[in-house]
Amino acid sequence: MGRTKPKFYPTYSSFPSSLFPLPSSLFLLRLTMKILTDWGFTREGWRNNSRGEYLVLLQGGLLTGFVILPVYQLPGLKIQSTQLLYIIWFLASILGLSGLIFIIKALIDLGKNLTPLPYPRENGELVQTGIYGIVRHPLYSGLILATLGWTLFQMSLSHLIASALLIILFEIKANREEAWLTKKYPAYSEYRQRVKKLIPGIY
């Protein structure tokens, strides 16, 4: 009489985790919803743009378009001098690195006050120190520097146009943001007179 082969009863851990994506998906969804809520996004805001939600969507679309935009150079535009080409690349690298520094430092200095919305967070505080003691909108400054650096590196006319559109958007978004900040923080008017908007010491 032969031995009876033991029966195998599958458990949840016996199956690949890819067959059960629901728990992890729900976790990511809840985490995303919590972050958006903390940032100040609401269903009402998406309907009526009460906190500048549409500007955030436009910003995301322009930045995505900038990344995937093909390089277009003017016909006949070719740098013959190797030294001049190296100088252009060096300047582009400086712009890009400066932009990255601005962005990272701004994120650190903002901390819990971070929100992509131009409308300030309900429990936020007015940040005037660090990089915010140099320019009022260092995140916008950093993105502008980074896009201009890439534009110069590629000598791309298409990216120059996209950079110009981003600068216009950031100007509009910054103005909307400052109107709300002035209402919420009495000290913002003095801070606005003391610190430049986008370019240290200039503008």
Image: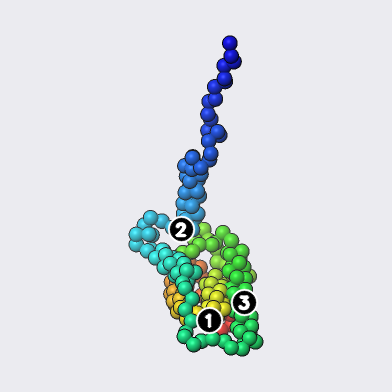
Residue marked by disc 3: 93
Cα separation, mark 1 vs mark 2, equals 39 Å
The residue shown at (58%, 14%) is: 2
Cα separation, mark 3 vs mark 1, equals 13 Å
Q: Can you give x and y, in whole percent of width and height, for residue 188 in the image?
A: 52, 72
* Residue 155: assigned label: 1
The residue shown at (64%, 83%) is: 86
Crowding at dot 3, Cα within 10 Å, few <14 / some 14-19 / many 20+, comes out as: some
- Along the line of sight, the residue nearer the viewer: 53 or 27: 27
Q: Can you give x and y, in whole percent of width and height, for residue 157 in the image?
A: 47, 81
Can you say whether 122 is above or below 203 in the image? above
Q: Residue furthest front?
A: 1
User: Total marks drawn?
Assistant: 3
Q: Amino acid at mark 1?
A: Met
Chain-order first, disc 3 or disc 1: 3
Chain-order first, disc 1 or disc 2: 2
Q: Amino acid at mark 3?
A: Ser
The residue shown at (45%, 69%) is: 65
Q: Can you tell which of label 1 and label 2 is closer to the viewer? A: 1
* Residue 40: assigned label: 2
Question: Label 1 near label 3: C-beta < 8 Å?
Answer: no
User: Can residue 116 be seen from the camera position used here?
Assistant: yes
User: Can residue 196 be seen from the camera position used here?
Assistant: no
- Along the line of sight, the residue nearer the viewer: 117 or 155: 155
Q: Amino acid at mark 2?
A: Gly
* Tag 3 secondary structure: helix
* Residue 142: assigned label: none
